Image (spheres, helix red, strand yellow):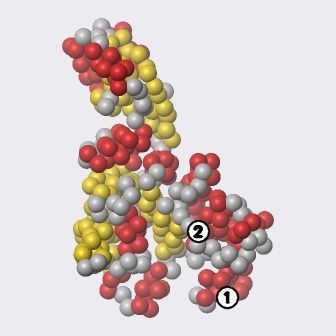
Amino acid sequence: MIELKQTSKTYEVNGKKVEAVKDVSLTVAKGEVFGVIGYSGAGKSTLIRCINLLEKPTSGDVLIDGKSLTSLTKQELQTTRRKIGMIFQGYNLLKTATVYDNIAIPLKLEGVDKQTIRERAETYLSIVGLSDKKNHYPSQLSGGQKQRVAIARALAHEPEILLSDEATSALDPETTEAILELLLKINQELGLTIFLITHELNVVQRICDRVAVMENGRVVEEGKVLDIFTRPEHPTTKRFLGSESAFKIPAELKDTYRKTGKLVSLYFKGNELSEEPALAMVSRKFDVLPSILAGSIEQLKNDTLGKLLVHLRGEKEAYEEAIAYLKNEGVIVEEAI
């Protein structure tokens, strides 16, 4: 559906070249929700704008359904862009237009007839839960409602791809969760392919199938969300995930625990949460006393991820045997950092 081939984007700023995106190659399947995370300045916004050629790549290629966008005429590109909707952090709504008109005006400019415009506006306002707000103005809406209007406007063009540029970063946690639920609904019921960029881990966890990590314009790691969250390989990914999601315990306590055993993070996937309690069996099988210091359960798009911070009290040989047993039972074990 979406394919980036060695895509690069270079700007010239004050006579100096700035490489915003460097040699990025990605493939996003039809119906997939693909996320890109990274720190500010990693190149995420430039990358997503290359997909619909709001930013034309300096080199490389962008393909939609196997068709190279960089080789299209201006008219052909405009036609192809109608298949690609986009929502932004800042909503980009017309302040003097009603909710209905914010959806209708772009369709009018495309030459869509009045009856179709009315049908689409009503359909997609219903999908985003704002049928009763169609005559309101943006100033009368909350931030979450404004974003819903922006989503309805993008959907009214009936695209096959939806691009999301930090669409939830200006929203409070409760509203963010509601928007993520809406995007999941759109993906599942309408079959839309969604490509999003974010610096919020919970966004990736909740709705993405796969994720790529960017740093300094490059993709440094890519994979299924569950794999990236449980087995990060690149130092940037480990740092990003660690700084955002690690259990926080005082350094002096860590030192104390390490002197009397091993401090580990345990990850349990989906059905493993309710099966035979592997951790409970450790104290029966080995000369080790496990103490749970912290825990969480996180809902991913298609799975559940449980995480425990555990102190395995005992001698080195004993806790190493216990760790080997846990791994053999399917538990992902990492030394807690």
Q: Residue at x 33, y 83 (%)?
A: 70
Total residue callouts: 2
Residue 116 x %, y %:
68, 82
Q: Residue 113 carries which label?
A: 1
Left or right of residue 22: residue 330:
right
Mark 1: secondary structure? loop
Q: What residue type is labelled 1?
A: Asp
Left or right of residue 165: residue 315:
left
Q: Quadrant of residue 21?
A: bottom left
Q: Quadrant of residue 91?
A: bottom right
Name the residue beneath numbered marker 2.
Answer: 91
Vertical position of residue 333 compared to residue 134: above or below:
above
Depth check: give the residue in front, 172 or 111: 172
Cα–Cα gap, marks 2 and 1:
25 Å
Callout 2 crowding tier (Cα within 10 Å): few <14, some 14–19, many ≥20: some
Vertical position of residue 187 compared to residue 120: above or below:
above
Residue 319 x %, y %:
27, 16
- Mark closer to the observer (2, 1): 2
Residue 40 x %, y %:
39, 58
Q: Quadrant of the C terminus?
A: top left
Mark 2: secondary structure? loop
Could one spot residue 136 in this view of the protein? yes
Q: Which residue lies furthest to the front in this view?
A: 14
Q: Which residue is drawn at 56% across and 67% down?
A: 90
Q: Which amino acid does label 2 sit on?
A: Tyr
